[in-house]
Image (cartoon, rainbow, N blue to C red):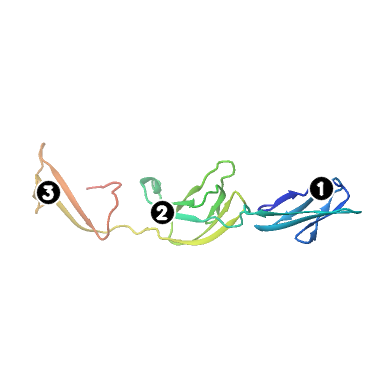
Amino acid sequence: MIGYKEYNVPAEDTDCYMYVNGNEVSYNGNGTGEYIVKENGAYDIEVRPYYYGEGAHRTITVNNIDRKGPEIEVKTYFYKGSIPEGGKAGLKVDIKSKDDNALKSVTFDGVKKDLTGYSMKHATFNAYRTSDYKIIVEDAAGNVTEKKQTIEVDTKKPVLKNVEIYKNNDKVTKTPCNVKIGDELRIRLTADEEIRGIRFCRFS
């Protein structure tokens, strides 16, 4: 079972009773027994002869059972490829493991990515709307973390508030203006919000 460990309890006398923390261990008849360890801690092991003689006793400590869900970090970023040609604005969402365990799978908004066999600690998805997204992350030990993450996607089109035209560093106040070869023509656009980048401008 995930997160459990099996310890063999050997005994020289194959006819014996075996106990772990006072609980009798299932005995398989060849001098060994198996006990499923579910939690970290100290375990008292005792072996008693079936007929006569002194028994054996020892204590072991188990501290490597991972039952904690993975800690994750969610980052969003924009880049040109986030908007398919003719498509809608979006963000890339990177979901990363903050602990040492590789991830088994990551589910974002119902889309699951299987990372088994890749020893990866992150997965990337697309977000095209502002919403509370459900994220499910499972690590290699089978521990699961679920959380909701609010992601805001700017889908509002910018509105041009002002357009200024400069010819050879002089502001053009009347249109149309005459432009000849060698003239430097610059256009300054002012929008109602910060423009991260301009994909294209069309003039007519």
**Nearer mark to the viewer, of 2 and 1:** 1
Which disc is residue 166 wearing? 3
8 vs 199, left or right, is right
Q: Earlier in the sequence, mark 2 or mark 1?
A: 1
Seen from the viewer's position, the closer of residues 65 and 179 is 65
User: What is the x, y in percent for residue 101?
Assistant: 55, 49
Q: What SS does tag 2 mark?
A: strand
Q: What SS does tag 1 mark?
A: loop
Q: What SS does tag 3 mark?
A: strand
Three-letter amino acid code at the position of disc 1 = Ala
Three-letter amino acid code at the position of disc 2 = Thr
Which disc is residue 76 wearing? 2
Q: Residues within 10 Å of mark 1 (few under 14, many from 20)?
A: some
135 vs 9, left or right, is left
Query: Which residue was labeled with disc 1?
Result: 11
Q: Earlier in the sequence, mark 2 or mark 3?
A: 2
The residues tagged by marks 3 and 1 sit, at their Cα atoms, a distance apart of 94 Å
58 vs 181, left or right, is right
Q: Earlier in the sequence, mark 3 or mark 1?
A: 1
**Nearer mark to the viewer, of 3 and 1:** 1
* Among the 4 quarters of the image, the one containing residue 156: bottom left
Q: Residue at x 41, y 54 (%)?
A: 76
Seen from the viewer's position, the closer of residues 9 and 12 is 12
The residues tagged by marks 2 and 3 sit, at their Cα atoms, a distance apart of 37 Å
